[in-house]
Protein backbone atom coordinates (compact mmCIF):
# COMPACT_ATOMS: atom_id res chain seq x y z
CA UNK A 1 0.00 0.00 0.00
CA UNK A 2 1.36 3.48 -0.83
CA UNK A 3 2.83 5.36 2.13
CA UNK A 4 4.68 8.58 2.86
CA UNK A 5 8.37 7.89 2.34
CA UNK A 6 9.76 11.41 2.51
CA UNK A 7 8.58 14.89 3.50
CA UNK A 8 10.56 17.94 2.41
CA UNK A 9 9.75 21.54 3.25
CA UNK A 10 11.41 24.59 1.72
CA UNK A 11 11.33 27.33 4.37
CA UNK A 12 12.72 29.96 1.97
CA UNK A 13 11.35 29.92 -1.56
CA UNK A 14 13.90 28.78 -4.18
CA UNK A 15 16.45 27.72 -1.55
CA UNK A 16 17.42 24.36 -0.09
CA UNK A 17 14.83 22.07 1.47
CA UNK A 18 14.75 20.25 4.77
CA UNK A 19 13.60 16.65 5.28
CA UNK A 20 11.30 16.32 8.29
CA UNK A 21 9.56 13.45 10.08
CA UNK A 22 6.21 15.23 10.10
CA UNK A 23 4.61 18.47 8.97
CA UNK A 24 1.49 20.23 10.17
CA UNK A 25 -1.07 21.66 7.77
CA UNK A 26 -1.06 25.46 7.91
CA UNK A 27 -4.29 27.47 7.96
CA UNK A 28 -4.07 28.20 4.22
CA UNK A 29 -3.56 24.56 3.25
CA UNK A 30 0.20 24.51 2.76
CA UNK A 31 2.61 22.60 4.98
CA UNK A 32 3.86 24.62 7.93
CA UNK A 33 7.18 26.33 7.10
CA UNK A 34 6.97 25.50 3.40
CA UNK A 35 7.89 28.56 1.28
CA UNK A 36 7.04 30.63 4.36
CA UNK A 37 9.64 33.22 3.35
CA UNK A 38 10.40 34.67 -0.08
CA UNK A 39 12.44 37.48 -1.62
CA UNK A 40 11.01 40.30 -3.74
CA UNK A 41 12.57 42.95 -5.98
CA UNK A 42 11.94 46.69 -5.98
CA UNK A 43 8.84 46.22 -8.18
CA UNK A 44 7.36 43.70 -5.77
CA UNK A 45 8.02 40.72 -8.05
CA UNK A 46 9.23 37.49 -6.53
CA UNK A 47 12.96 36.83 -6.72
CA UNK A 48 13.30 33.13 -7.45
CA UNK A 49 15.62 30.66 -9.12
CA UNK A 50 13.74 30.95 -12.42
CA UNK A 51 14.85 34.57 -12.77
CA UNK A 52 18.05 34.46 -10.71
CA UNK A 53 20.00 31.22 -11.33
CA UNK A 54 22.73 32.33 -8.91
CA UNK A 55 20.35 31.42 -6.07
CA UNK A 56 21.37 27.81 -6.79
CA UNK A 57 24.87 28.64 -5.56
CA UNK A 58 23.66 29.54 -2.06
CA UNK A 59 23.38 26.70 0.46
CA UNK A 60 20.84 27.11 3.25
CA UNK A 61 20.99 25.01 6.41
CA UNK A 62 18.10 25.31 8.86
CA UNK A 63 17.56 24.85 12.57
CA UNK A 64 13.83 25.43 12.77
CA UNK A 65 13.68 24.62 16.49
CA UNK A 66 15.45 27.94 17.00
CA UNK A 67 14.25 29.66 13.82
CA UNK A 68 17.76 29.87 12.37
CA UNK A 69 19.19 29.64 8.87
CA UNK A 70 22.87 29.50 7.91
CA UNK A 71 23.77 30.66 4.40
CA UNK A 72 26.99 29.52 2.74
CA UNK A 73 28.36 30.60 -0.63
CA UNK A 74 31.82 31.05 -2.09
CA UNK A 75 33.60 30.70 1.22
CA UNK A 76 31.16 32.96 3.08
CA UNK A 77 28.95 31.64 5.85
CA UNK A 78 26.61 33.46 8.20
CA UNK A 79 23.78 32.46 10.53
CA UNK A 80 20.60 34.54 10.85
CA UNK A 81 17.40 34.49 12.86
CA UNK A 82 14.56 34.04 10.36
CA UNK A 83 12.20 36.26 12.32
CA UNK A 84 14.42 39.00 13.72
CA UNK A 85 17.03 39.31 10.96
CA UNK A 86 14.76 39.66 7.92
CA UNK A 87 16.38 42.89 6.74
CA UNK A 88 19.89 41.52 7.31
CA UNK A 89 19.03 38.35 5.39
CA UNK A 90 17.68 40.41 2.48
CA UNK A 91 20.86 42.49 2.47
CA UNK A 92 23.12 39.40 2.45
CA UNK A 93 21.19 37.66 -0.32
CA UNK A 94 20.80 40.87 -2.33
CA UNK A 95 24.54 41.54 -2.17
CA UNK A 96 25.24 38.02 -3.42
CA UNK A 97 22.74 38.31 -6.28
CA UNK A 98 23.79 41.86 -7.14
CA UNK A 99 20.30 43.31 -6.76
CA UNK A 100 18.29 44.88 -3.95
CA UNK A 101 15.72 42.54 -2.42
CA UNK A 102 13.30 42.51 0.48
CA UNK A 103 12.16 39.43 2.41
CA UNK A 104 8.54 38.72 3.32
CA UNK A 105 6.80 36.11 5.43
CA UNK A 106 3.46 34.34 4.95
CA UNK A 107 2.69 31.61 7.48
CA UNK A 108 -0.82 31.02 6.13
CA UNK A 109 -0.19 29.75 2.58
CA UNK A 110 3.48 30.47 2.13
CA UNK A 111 4.51 31.68 -1.34
CA UNK A 112 3.66 28.77 -3.67
CA UNK A 113 4.20 28.89 -7.44
CA UNK A 114 0.53 28.00 -7.92
CA UNK A 115 -1.53 30.46 -5.89
CA UNK A 116 -4.78 28.61 -6.67
CA UNK A 117 -3.47 25.26 -5.43
CA UNK A 118 -1.60 25.95 -2.23
CA UNK A 119 -1.33 22.40 -0.90
CA UNK A 120 1.82 20.28 -0.94
CA UNK A 121 3.12 18.86 -4.20
CA UNK A 122 3.06 15.06 -4.31
CA UNK A 123 5.22 12.59 -6.26
CA UNK A 124 6.28 8.97 -5.91
CA UNK A 125 9.86 8.10 -5.05
CA UNK A 126 9.80 5.61 -7.94
CA UNK A 127 8.99 8.48 -10.31
CA UNK A 128 12.00 10.45 -9.11
CA UNK A 129 14.22 7.38 -9.49
CA UNK A 130 12.94 6.79 -13.02
CA UNK A 131 13.70 10.38 -14.02
CA UNK A 132 17.11 10.11 -12.37
CA UNK A 133 17.81 7.04 -14.53
CA UNK A 134 16.80 8.91 -17.69
CA UNK A 135 19.57 11.45 -17.12
CA UNK A 136 22.14 9.39 -15.22
CA UNK A 137 21.62 11.51 -12.09
CA UNK A 138 21.38 10.51 -8.46
CA UNK A 139 18.02 10.31 -6.74
CA UNK A 140 19.03 13.16 -4.42
CA UNK A 141 20.00 15.46 -7.26
CA UNK A 142 16.71 14.71 -9.04
CA UNK A 143 14.82 15.39 -5.83
CA UNK A 144 16.53 18.77 -5.54
CA UNK A 145 15.63 19.67 -9.12
CA UNK A 146 11.90 18.94 -8.82
CA UNK A 147 11.43 20.10 -5.21
CA UNK A 148 8.25 18.17 -4.33
CA UNK A 149 6.98 18.15 -0.75
CA UNK A 150 5.65 14.62 -0.25
CA UNK A 151 7.19 11.48 -1.73
CA UNK A 152 5.13 8.31 -1.85
CA UNK A 153 6.73 4.89 -1.51
CA UNK A 154 5.22 1.45 -2.08
CA UNK A 155 3.97 2.29 -5.57
CA UNK A 156 5.28 2.32 -9.16
CA UNK A 157 6.60 5.28 -11.10
CA UNK A 158 3.98 7.87 -12.05
CA UNK A 159 1.45 6.42 -9.61
CA UNK A 160 0.76 9.99 -8.48
CA UNK A 161 -1.00 10.59 -11.83
CA UNK A 162 -3.87 8.53 -10.38
CA UNK A 163 -4.42 11.32 -7.83
CA UNK A 164 -5.74 13.72 -10.49
CA UNK A 165 -8.75 13.58 -12.80
CA UNK A 166 -9.60 15.41 -15.99
CA UNK A 167 -8.79 19.11 -15.89
CA UNK A 168 -11.30 21.01 -13.77
CA UNK A 169 -12.11 18.06 -11.52
CA UNK A 170 -10.69 16.99 -8.16
CA UNK A 171 -9.68 13.61 -6.76
CA UNK A 172 -10.00 13.21 -3.00
CA UNK A 173 -7.32 11.20 -1.26
CA UNK A 174 -6.14 10.81 2.28
CA UNK A 175 -2.68 10.82 3.81
CA UNK A 176 -2.95 9.58 7.37
CA UNK A 177 -5.57 11.83 8.96
CA UNK A 178 -5.39 14.57 6.31
CA UNK A 179 -7.77 14.78 3.34
CA UNK A 180 -6.34 16.37 0.18
CA UNK A 181 -7.69 17.24 -3.25
CA UNK A 182 -5.53 16.28 -6.23
CA UNK A 183 -6.15 18.96 -8.84
CA UNK A 184 -3.51 19.39 -11.49
CA UNK A 185 -0.37 17.93 -13.00
CA UNK A 186 2.45 20.31 -12.18
CA UNK A 187 3.86 22.08 -15.25
CA UNK A 188 7.58 22.52 -14.86
CA UNK A 189 9.74 25.59 -15.38
CA UNK A 190 13.42 26.03 -16.20
CA UNK A 191 14.59 25.07 -12.69
CA UNK A 192 14.68 21.25 -13.16
CA UNK A 193 16.97 21.71 -16.16
CA UNK A 194 19.63 23.32 -13.98
CA UNK A 195 22.37 21.83 -11.88
CA UNK A 196 21.04 22.41 -8.34
CA UNK A 197 24.49 23.44 -7.07
CA UNK A 198 25.63 25.75 -9.87
CA UNK A 199 22.51 26.84 -11.74
CA UNK A 200 24.06 25.81 -15.08
CA UNK A 201 21.30 24.65 -17.43
CA UNK A 202 21.23 21.59 -19.69
CA UNK A 203 19.55 22.93 -22.83
CA UNK A 204 18.52 19.43 -23.92
CA UNK A 205 16.79 18.63 -20.64
CA UNK A 206 13.20 19.57 -21.47
CA UNK A 207 13.25 17.92 -24.91
CA UNK A 208 14.64 14.65 -23.54
CA UNK A 209 12.31 14.77 -20.55
CA UNK A 210 9.20 15.23 -22.70
CA UNK A 211 10.20 12.39 -25.00
CA UNK A 212 10.62 9.96 -22.09
CA UNK A 213 7.51 11.17 -20.29
CA UNK A 214 5.38 10.72 -23.42
CA UNK A 215 6.67 7.19 -23.86
CA UNK A 216 6.05 6.18 -20.24
CA UNK A 217 2.92 8.06 -19.25
CA UNK A 218 0.40 5.67 -17.63
CA UNK A 219 -2.76 4.73 -19.52
CA UNK A 220 -4.84 6.06 -16.61
CA UNK A 221 -3.27 9.54 -16.70
CA UNK A 222 -6.02 12.04 -17.67
CA UNK A 223 -5.21 13.36 -21.13
CA UNK A 224 -6.55 16.89 -20.55
CA UNK A 225 -3.92 17.36 -17.84
CA UNK A 226 -1.09 16.96 -20.35
CA UNK A 227 -1.22 19.52 -23.16
CA UNK A 228 2.51 18.82 -23.26
CA UNK A 229 4.63 16.33 -21.36
CA UNK A 230 6.84 18.64 -19.32
CA UNK A 231 4.73 17.89 -16.22
CA UNK A 232 5.82 16.06 -13.08
CA UNK A 233 4.22 15.72 -9.60
CA UNK A 234 0.73 16.93 -8.75
CA UNK A 235 -0.62 20.12 -7.21
CA UNK A 236 -3.14 19.86 -4.38
CA UNK A 237 -5.43 21.79 -2.10
CA UNK A 238 -6.21 21.09 1.55
CA UNK A 239 -9.38 22.47 3.13
CA UNK A 240 -9.20 24.88 6.05
CA UNK A 241 -10.90 22.22 8.21
CA UNK A 242 -7.70 20.14 8.01
CA UNK A 243 -5.48 22.85 9.54
CA UNK A 244 -3.14 21.71 12.33
CA UNK A 245 -3.45 18.04 11.38
CA UNK A 246 -0.17 16.22 10.79
CA UNK A 247 1.25 14.40 7.79
CA UNK A 248 3.88 11.95 9.03
CA UNK A 249 6.44 9.57 7.60
CA UNK A 250 4.86 6.14 7.20
CA UNK A 251 1.30 7.46 6.84
CA UNK A 252 -0.80 5.37 4.44
CA UNK A 253 -2.09 7.02 1.26
CA UNK A 254 -5.61 6.07 0.13
CA UNK A 255 -7.76 7.33 -2.73
CA UNK A 256 -11.28 8.10 -1.51
Image: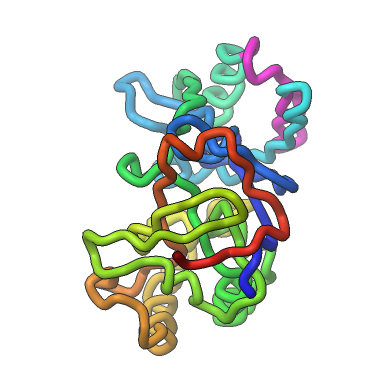
Residue 109, percent across and down?
44, 32
Quadrant in the rendering for residue 29: top left
Q: Quick check: is 18 in the magenta stretch?
A: no
Residue 16 in view, yes or no: no
Q: Count the labels in the image.
A: 0
Report the colour scheme: rainbow
Nearest the camera: 160 or 242?
242
Residue 42, percent across and down?
35, 19
Residue 161 in view, yes or no: yes
Nearest the camera: 5 or 80?
5
Residue 40, percent across and down?
41, 25
Nearest the camera: 162 or 63?
162
Query: What is the magenta range?
Result: 68-85
Above or below for 181 versus 57: below
Left or right placement of residue 237 versus residue 72 in this view: left
Above or below for 99 versus 171: above
Predominant secondary structure, magenta span = strand
Q: Residue at x 52, y 24 (%)?
A: 94
Q: Residue at x 30, y 43 (%)?
A: 116
Nearest the camera: 121 or 63?
121
Above or below for 90 versus 23: above
User: Image quadrant for the N terminus?
Assistant: bottom right
Q: Quick check: is 80 in the magenta stretch?
A: yes
User: Image quadrant for the C terminus?
Assistant: bottom left
Q: Residue at x 34, y 58 (%)?
A: 183
Quadrant in the rendering for residue 150: bottom right
Q: Residue at x 52, y 58 (%)?
A: 174
Residue 78, percent across and down?
75, 24
Amino acid sequence: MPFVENIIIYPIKSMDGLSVAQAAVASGGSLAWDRQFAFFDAEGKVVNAKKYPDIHRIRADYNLNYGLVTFSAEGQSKTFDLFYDIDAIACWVGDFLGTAVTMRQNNCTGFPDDNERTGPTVISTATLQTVADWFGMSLEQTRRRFRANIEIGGCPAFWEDSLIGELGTAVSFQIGEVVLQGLKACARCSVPSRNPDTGVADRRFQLLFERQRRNQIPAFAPKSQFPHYYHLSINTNIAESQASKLIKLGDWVQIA
